[in-house]
Amino acid sequence: MKAMQYKAFGGSEVIEQVEVSTPSIQNENDVLIQVKAASVNPIDMKIRMGFMKQIRPVEMPFIPGGEVAGIVVATGEKVSKFKAGDEVIAIPQKNGYAQFVVANENFVVPKPQSLSFEEAASIGVNIGTAQSVLFTEGKLAKGQKVLIQGGGGAVGGAMVQMAKAAGAYVIATASGEGVALAKSLGADEVIDYKSQDVTSIVTGVDLVADTAGGEAQAGLFRVLKQGGKLLSIVVPPSQELAEQFHVEARFIASDLSFQTLKNGLDLIAAGKFKPIVSRTFKLEEAATAQDFLTAGGVNGKVILVVA
Ligand SMILES: NC(=O)c1ccc[n+]([C@@H]2O[C@H](COP(=O)([O-])OP(=O)(O)OC[C@H]3O[C@@H](n4cnc5c(N)ncnc54)[C@H](OP(=O)(O)O)[C@@H]3O)[C@@H](O)[C@H]2O)c1
């Protein structure tokens, strides 16, 4: 089968198109999927650059791609939820930039019929991460005030929609076209972080969901009320500042299993969640697609179409 892989860490030039054997079912809970679309996530570039060696070691040669949509081809003996021919979304963690991939059935969900494969490949990491941060860890409740840092991004856009659907008051930071996007996704207030200082405008926030990290994170402590939470999916927040502002602050690693995706899938079925695909590329253009996302200013998901 056709796949995109690399043999050494580095820039996007290390990615090459190869012919490799089609993977086969190895475990009784495995699902073999013909990939129709694979999403490009920021972690793909962090792994490729070698930044994740300690926490996500990989074996070379490595086929990136943690999130796909496609059609089930075969299933392991114990798989009960899926059969050949089913259209699915899967989070295989790796090997997704290819024509076929194997995933554990706990990380496979039925593809919503209303979505194209490209749209379907865009939602798993977004809704699973949003669910983990906002509800599993953040305990966001109706009427509470949430600030979503990076509300025009892939995960941030999902957070805006899911927080709004839960009845929260949603404030998002964004820039460029992300401002209008976050507003259209339901944010009550959108702050252009390039021309306005969120820390001097917003106060009394119950939960900050940080999808941007960087130096700006330290300022976000100021917008929280005492006892509030700052949860980041990018870098662990300062515990010194957490103590100083009397808030809780943690890094969250998302849970992307079947159960965590359920709320987002229900919202899609109810027409209350819109997948945002920024741009599609062919599988063979994986290096260009990664560079496009790395360049920034992208609103929504970058998707590889697999033929
Ligand atoms: N921990 C986990 O489990 C987990 C899961 C998923 C993703 N992540 C990580 O979360 C991050 C976001 O992922 P993503 O897919 O949503 O990426 P993305 O689509 O590139 O979104 C990032 C957003 O952050 C915005 N941003 C950058 N600097 C900002 C600032 N100073 N203030 C406010 N917003 C700012 C960007 O807006 P502009 O483009 O307008 O600057 C962009 O919209 C990545 O680092 C990814 O690796 C972690």
Image: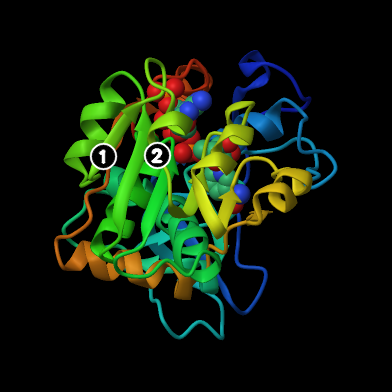
Could you say which disc has been placed on residue 84 in the image?
none
| Residues under numbered marks 2 and 1 in contact, where contact means CB atoms less than 8 Å apart | yes
Q: Give the percent coordinates (x, y) of residue 273.
A: 23, 55
In the displayed structure, 26 sits above or below 133; it is below
Please report the residue visible at 42 percent of the width from the left and 64 percent of the height from the top.
Answer: 73
Report the front residue among 147 and 49: 147
Q: Give the percent coordinates (x, y) of residue 241.
A: 71, 44
Tell me which amino acid carries mark 1.
Glu
* Image-quadrant location for residue 4: top right
What secondary structure is found at the residue carrying circle 1?
strand
Task: Pick the quarter of the image with the C terminus.
Answer: top left
Which residue was labeled with disc 1? Answer: 189
In the displayed structure, 74 sits above or below 119; it is below
Closer to the camera: disc 2 or disc 1?
A: 2
Please report the residue visible at 76 percent of the width from the left and 38 percent of the height from the top.
Answer: 52
**Real-space CA distance between mark 2 and mark 1, rounded to the nearest whole angstrom:** 10 Å
Could you say which disc has been placed on residue 202 in the image?
2
Please report the residue visible at 56 percent of the width from the left and 62 percent of the height from the top.
Answer: 103
- Does residue 271 appear left or right of residue 72 in this picture? left
What secondary structure is found at the residue carrying circle 2?
loop
In the displayed structure, 74 sits above or below 153; it is below
- Does residue 23 appear left or right of residue 204 in this picture? right
